[in-house]
Image (cartoon, rainbow, N blue to C red):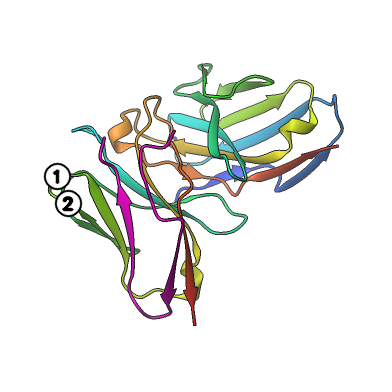
Amino acid sequence: DAKTTQPTSMDCAEGRAANLPCNHSTISGNEYVYWYRQIHSQGPQYIIHGLKNNETNEMASLIITEDRKSSTLILPHATLRDTAVYYCITGGSQGNLIFGKGTKLSVKP
Amino acid sequence: DVKVTQSSRYLVKRTGEKVFLECVQDMDHENMFWYRQDPGLGLRLIYFSYDVKMKEKGDIPEGYSVSREKKERFSLILESASTNQTSMYLCASSFYRDIAKNIQYFGAGTRLSVL
């Protein structure tokens, strides 16, 4: 079973920031938090990952709470092309990624 | 950019056929994975490989086998296709064996229909 909990769906207005929350209360000290997204009929796409510090790249920002039990992915200026299912993941024991159901983000004009 | 290429986007096969799904990555990654994705069940790991000629079973290996003769290529084989193997198959690769740095790159997927 996935070790993370995410809302089933969220809406966001185009041009606004999309903030996607994730709970991972059982994360261990050396586990990273990864975010992927999957646009319809495509393979998952890596977005960002972090351990305990906040991270930013050209796609998004990742805010991890100090106790590491939750995190938030921020898409600063959502576009219609950001409509996708977003997965928050902590590493599996076999090196695989255990995907949960994710959050279906709908960006609306 | 990392490129993971799956040989077919769509495939239709008949029950009992032997099916080969091919995956090639161009970044010299050591690790390669095969997942299947079904509605309501998410992605499930079938097999993975950390090195040439090496394979490990994932969560749902029954009915499947794999081959990794070269570092860049990882094949998934359905020995005798059945209708319950109709699914989206996703291949992924990654560089680090350490799961703490395990960024996986996925192919576009193969949607297999077994009739």
Tell me the magenta residue range: A1-26
Chain bearing tag 2 is A
**Mark 2 Cα-neighbour bin, 10 Å: few <14, some 14–19, many ≥20:** few
Foreground pick, A74 / A25? A25
Q: Could you tell whether A28 is left or right of B76 in the image?
A: left
Q: Residue A65 bears which disc, if any?
A: 2
Determine which residue is flagged by label 1: A67
Residue at the spot x=28%, y=34% of the render? B100
Q: Within the magenta stretch, is there residue B51?
A: no
Which residue is the extreme one toward the left? A66
Residue at the spot x=25%, y=40% of the render? A25
**Mark 1 Cα-neighbour bin, 10 Å: few <14, some 14–19, many ≥20:** few
Q: Within the magenta stretch, is there residue A18?
A: yes
Query: Of helix, strand and loop, which one carries label 2?
Result: loop
Residue A14 against residue A68 in the figure, above or below: below
Residue A42 placement: quadrant: bottom right
Residue A59 placement: quadrant: bottom left
Label 1 with label 2: CB-CB less than 8 Å: yes
Circles 1 and 2 on the same subunit = yes
Chain bearing tag 1 is A
Please state, as top left, top right, bottom left or bottom right, where the N terminus of chain A lies in the image.
Answer: top left
Q: Could you tell whether A101 is left or right of B62 in the image?
A: left
What amino acid is labelled 2 in the image? Thr
Where does the image place residue A91, in percent across and percent down from the top left?
A: 34, 35
Where does the image place residue B40, in percent across and percent down from the top left?
A: 58, 44
Where does the image place residue A51, in percent across and percent down from the top left?
A: 21, 43
